[in-house]
Image (cartoon, rainbow, N blue to C red):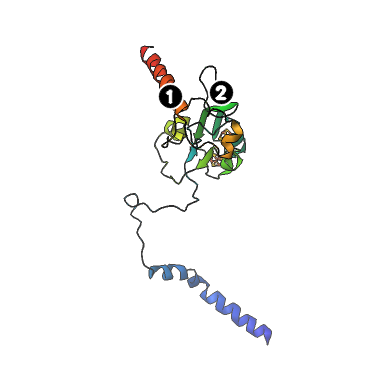
Amino acid sequence: MADKNDKQQGFLEELFAPVAGFGVTFATMFRTVTTEEYPEEKRPTQLRFHGRHQLNRHPDGLEKCVGCELCAWACPADAILVEGADNNDADGQRFSPGERYGRVYQINYLRCIFCGLCIEACPTRALTMTNEYELADDNRADLIFTKDQLLAPLQSGMAPAPHPMVAGMDEKDYYKGAVTGATPAQEEWVREHHASADQEGQSA
Ligand code: SF4
Ligand code: SF4
């Protein structure tokens, strides 16, 4: 009896197999059509969407990147190039709290697969990802983003690096969040030194 039922079921399955494949097609024909009006209308991404990277700053404008290269080592696509250099207070070349900063920083968006391993590897939260996803271009050079493109814009209360650290604070204070903005002394330093650097650049 069981054999007879199995045979009947097998026969029916074989009979309807060629049309079963069209089930999805027929069901889709009666669904409401949704037209995305991109790029005129852009829908917001999910909050944790992995988009273009950003190199963050401390509240006084110094850079969070310490040039350690951990992001580059973590990247499975070999998309990141970092070259660190020493901060130098004597020469007025301090870009980050602590010893080193990222002198050269590049991300190759022809290679990047937006996996986010680099931001997980970053010990200072210098590197994060934004929600920006419009990264198409028609040539290779424009898809290799350099440090000036990746660095977060200055917010109010920040002074552009290079400049000294907040007086009396050390590297740990910066990472504990004790620095809340550029002090008048830092702003004054930037006014003096950046103006003279601009003049030197113009006369050269
Ligand atoms: S998101 Fe992934 S592929 Fe892209 S730079 Fe970071 S680690 Fe590399
Ligand atoms: S972004 Fe982070 S991991 Fe990469 S070099 Fe800078 S501090 Fe290191």
**Residue sticking out furthest to the top:** 204
Q: 22 and 102: which one is in front? A: 102
Snapshot quadrant of residue 169 = top right
Between marks 1 and 2 in the image, the one whose residue lies nearer the viewer:
1
- From the viewer's perspective, tell me whether residue 191 is left or right of residue 85: left
Question: Residue shown at 53%/76% (left/top)?
Answer: 15
Is any part of residue 22 visible from this angle? Answer: no
Is any part of residue 59 visible from this angle? Answer: yes
Q: Is residue 133 above or below residue 195?
A: below
State the image coordinates of residue 164 (x, y, percent, origin top left): 51, 25
Element on which disc 1 rests: helix
- Give whichever of discs 1 and 2 has the lower sequence position: 2
Name the residue tied to disc 1: 188
Q: Amino acid at mark 1?
A: Glu
State the image coordinates of residue 39 (x, y, percent, origin top left): 34, 49
Ligand 1, image quadrant it occupies: top right
Q: Is residue 115 above or below residue 170?
A: below
Indicate which disc residue 87 carries. Answer: 2
Q: Amino acid at mark 2?
A: Asn
Mark 1 neighbour density, 10 Å: few (under 14) some (14–19) many (20 or more): some
Q: Which quadrant of the rendered structure holds the C terminus?
A: top left
Question: Residue shown at 53%/38% (left/top)?
Answer: 127
Asked if the residue at label 1 sits under 8 Å from ligand 2, the reply is no
Mark 2 neighbour density, 10 Å: few (under 14) some (14–19) many (20 or more): many
Q: Which quadrant of the rendered structure holds the N terminus?
A: bottom right
State the image coordinates of residue 72 (x, y, percent, origin top left): 59, 34
**Residue sticking out furthest to the left:** 40
Element on which disc 2 rests: loop
State the image coordinates of residue 64 (x, y, percent, origin top left): 54, 34
Give the number of callouts: 2
Question: Residue shown at 43%/71% (left/top)?
Answer: 27
Q: CA distance from mark 1 to mark 2?
A: 20 Å
